[in-house]
Amino acid sequence: MTISLAVPDILVARARAGDLEALEALYRAFETPVYNLALRILRTPEDAEDVLQETFLEVVRSIKQYRGEGHLWGWIKRIAASKALMRIRRNQVRATEELDEESTGGPGSTGGVPMQIDLERAFERLSETSRSVVWMHDVEGYTHEEIAEQMGKTVSFSKSQLARAHARLRRMLDAEGAA
Amino acid sequence: MMHCTMDDLLALKENEASAWAKQHLETCPACRAELDALYQRIAALKALPVRRPARDRWPAVRDAIRADQRRRRRRWGAWSLAAAAGIALLLLVRPSGGRVDAAELQRVKQQSATLEAELDRYDPDGRVTSGRTAALAAVLEDRIAVIDGELAQLGTPQAPVRRAELVKLWQERVDAMQQLMSVRVTRVAYVGL
Ligand SMILES: [Zn+2]
């Protein structure tokens, strides 16, 4: 997914002044990419919507600190990723069981479906931590150093999570292809 | 025969692989196929469809923003107009010579931040303003936004020449904010624009 969201400076200035119309315009501009990022990392649409809401409230509260260094989407994405990661930690406290990626077959395992659908389903079966590392690294283009910093983990944790996740994806897609 | 692990394959992709892995890849078609598959998986992940929220969360967000704004307004209500007018009279002391140093830049930035904080506390939504005053405030806000855009493009240069340019922009920002402050406080209809 490539995003080139250019927002006029005037709009940002009005949003900073608390203008609700400008804030809504900003919300509409970023609602889908923020939601998509959160949904890919988290498990449920409800969680992703909550992250969308939390992200935007944070954007409104700290937009006075945003001075236009770097792209606005980069700044918002960072807030969204950190909100999503925070929710993962909260979810992990609630559910102690590490999700068994390979055991749940999921409904309707039909053969001959296109590769993309297989991959999407396989990706959804990874743990939230694995998904966040894969998504941030492979899709959003974060480095292992950046991921480690955002997650409060080490670089080698990020690297090994990525390798484990890819090994699982590969096994799942393999099993899917053989079925 | 030993093959590349997923760590090796990812390292190969990042160009950080060991000499052994690079060497092995040359001679092993199976590992080359694995590396291809890795690239394909990543390309397929990037190509996943964009998901959109099923429900509109904007009303909830808007309500939360309004509640925040009401809280700030109540804080402002405790403020006296006289105090605000005092702040509006904060005078900008311009640098006398052409000498522009880092401290000067720091000072003008600080001044800008102080004014911005005061403007923020002086919430315009809570007051009735004439159309002329509101239009004037909008012009000034736009001017500040344009300056912010220029500041963003300049970044934080180290060279003195560009620093002078930066200080000039920050001073323009402070000027515009002072005018905005006096528009809001005194509701004047003319600030020499
Ligand atoms: Zn091999």
Image: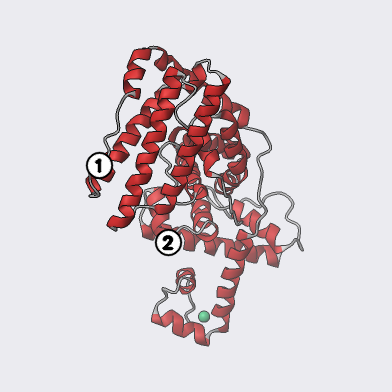
Chain of the residue where label 1 is placed in the rendered structure: B
Extreme residue toward the front, this view = B192
- Under circle 1, the secondary element is loop
- Tell me the crowding category of disc 2: few under 14, some 14 to 19, or many 20 or more residues within 10 angstroms, Cα based: many
Using the image as rendered, state which of residue A153 and residue B111 is in the foreground.
B111
* Residue A159, numbered circle: 2
Question: Relative to residue B75, is residue A89 depicted above or below?
Answer: below
Question: Relative to residue B150, is residue A55 depicted above or below?
Answer: above
User: Do the residues bearing badges 1 and 2 touch, measured as CB atoms within 8 Å?
Assistant: no
Question: Relative to residue B60, is residue B53 depicted above or below?
Answer: below
- Under circle 2, the secondary element is helix
Which quadrant is the N terminus of chain A positioned in?
Answer: bottom right
> Residue A31, image x and y in percent?
60, 41
Using the image as rendered, state which of residue B144 and residue B55 is in the foreground.
B144
Using the image as rendered, state which of residue A159 and residue B141 is in the foreground.
B141
Does ligand 1 reach within 8 Å of label 2's beta carbon? no
Determine if marks 1 and 2 fall on one subunit: no
Residue at figure coordinates x 58%, y 61% from the top left: A169
Residue at figure coordinates x 57%, y 34% from the top left: A22
Amino acid beneath label 1: Pro
Q: How is the image coloured?
A: secondary structure
Using residue B86 as the reference point, say whether residue A23 is left or right of it: right
For residue B59, say whether it is visible: yes
| Total marks placed | 2
Amino acid beneath label 2: Lys
> Residue A39, image x and y in percent?
59, 45
Which marked residue is nearer to the observer: mark 1 or mark 2? Answer: 1
Q: Label 1 vs label 2: CA separation?
A: 53 Å
> Residue A29, image x and y in percent?
61, 43
Q: Return the residue at label 1.
A: B95
For residue B158, say whether it is visible: no
